[in-house]
Image: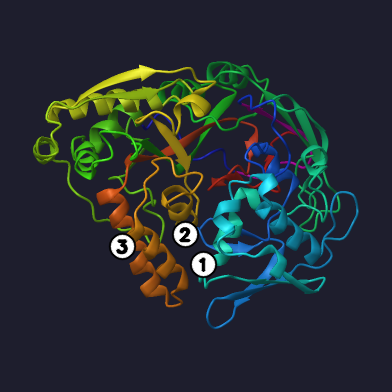
Amino acid sequence: SEAVPTRGPAGRPDRGGTLRIARPPASDAETLDPASALSAYEYLGALYNRLVRVDKEGKVAPDLAESWEPDAKARTWTFRLRRGVTFHDGSAFTSADAAYTLRHILDTATASPQGPVLAPLIDPKRLRTPDPHTLVIPLKSPHAEFPSLLTHYNCYVVPDGSAKSIGRTGIGTGPFKLASFTAAGPGRVVAYGDHWAGRPVLDAIDFFSVADMQARANALLAGQVDLLSQTNLDFATARVIAASSRATIARSKNAQWYVLPMLTTEKPFTDVRVRQAMKLAYDPEHIRRVALQGAGTLGWDNPVPPSDPTHIAAHPAHDPERAHHLLKRAGHERLAVDLYTSSYDPIFTPMALAYQESAARAGIRVRVRTAAADSYYTQIWMKKPLMATYWYTGRPVDQLLNQVFRSGSSYNETAWSDKEFDALLDRARRETDEGRRRELYGQAQTLVIERGGAITPMFADRLTGISRKVRGYAEHGFEFDYLGIGLKGA
């Protein structure tokens, strides 16, 4: 993995210039409404701000909220909002906009993925705005980590009353304002001079929709675009780009976690012994070597990244003999399963083939089946009993465990339902003592590892193709810094 740099070019950008971003084509129903499941992800950080964000250390940091504090029981949270902030249409940002944004996410008509995460906690009718710079959020039950849930990218703040128009107008408080937008197509944003944190370095960003990864890589090598968004490059392509005169690679450590979710509602994965066997059967080191050429960290079936302060390092060792024994007891001695993959992401198929090879040693026959990339997330994900997928890291632990593993959550891709696990999450939320809370999140991780349906072989470094002219590209969690990114010789 030495042939691929660990960070993008150093040094300061020059003022001005237009950054050209190539992105995968999205749905025709794509929208600029941040709350939507079909939000135009690349535009959000340019157009909007949240109340709070995640900083490079993974901590909750101020954005439109300057400070926040809970009452003694972590039941009512008060956010003090930044003054002198304007939306792109010139109107002042106030607590009414912040409250409206939460109501919009919670409105079932919005169908926001973040809705079910916040709905058990917030009654939209009880939100209070005692003055234009104060938002009071009374919770239905105590939650000591509540602000972390507002860092999600569905939580970008939109103007009061904008539900019907925001998907087209993109009016936010962010460093750029909308010039044009086409769903699944091209678009442009331009610098907003009155941005509260100062004007961005760039004059504009142009977005292009480019169908496949190879075409995006070729556009970068030809100097037609400067950055490949939402494109984790395979190692061979990354090497070619890093060796070129025009482009190079920026690497974001452990930025994605790769997973083979087993649907726990479908046989044979309804049996916890089969799920345990599927995890013990494979060697994560083999998968990391084959699929990532070593550019990543072993997952050991725990989706909480090693950098998270609550991460537990304990894990069951790779043990094909024990896997075989568990399958025999479960009556599945000659287990054969289909594992679905697609070219949607370059890591899926090498990961699936490496798993197949590894699990064969425990006597599990895996048939790797390739599905179409463009319908993969509508036809395969959460429908087939076993498939390959990935998530971005950067979710705070409470968001991650509740959104992806809690019973009934809309993103619970394994359909796993465990009352003890759900109760642990509830206890962790109510716990105001940090050490005790960490312990409870640790116990919850243990249950995910031992009983859950997610096979998590590894965390992968995201390899992002960028022009050698790009400066100030640093990514963490879901986003890079739109304010500071720029070009040399703009």
Q: Position of residue 12 (x, y in %)?
A: 66, 45
Residue 382: quadrant of the picture: top left
Depth check, front residue: 340 or 79: 340
Which mark is on residue 443? 3
Q: Residue at x 83, y 42 (%)?
A: 165
Query: Marks 3 and 2, how far apart in space?
Result: 13 Å
Q: In the displayed structure, does residue 408 sit left or right of residue 136?
A: left
Stretch of the chain drawn in magenta: 11-23
Q: Secondary structure at mark 1?
A: loop
Q: Residue at x 69, y 63 (%)?
A: 124
Q: Indicate yes or no whether the magenta region holds residue 13.
A: yes
Q: In the displayed structure, does residue 98 sit left or right of residue 317?
A: right
Task: Check disc 2 and report the residue beneath it.
Answer: 398
Residue sitting farthest toward the right: 90
Q: Is residue 23 at least partly visible in the picture?
A: yes
Q: Residues within 10 Å of mark 3 (few under 14, many from 20)?
A: some
Q: Indicate yes or no whether the magenta region holds residue 73.
A: no
Depth check, front residue: 5 or 395: 395
Depth check, front residue: 227 or 341: 341
Q: Position of residue 426 (x, y in %)?
A: 43, 66
Residue sitting farthest toward the bottom: 72
Q: Amino acid at mark 3?
A: Gln
**Number of numbered callouts drawn:** 3
Marks 1 and 2, the one that precedes in the sequence: 1
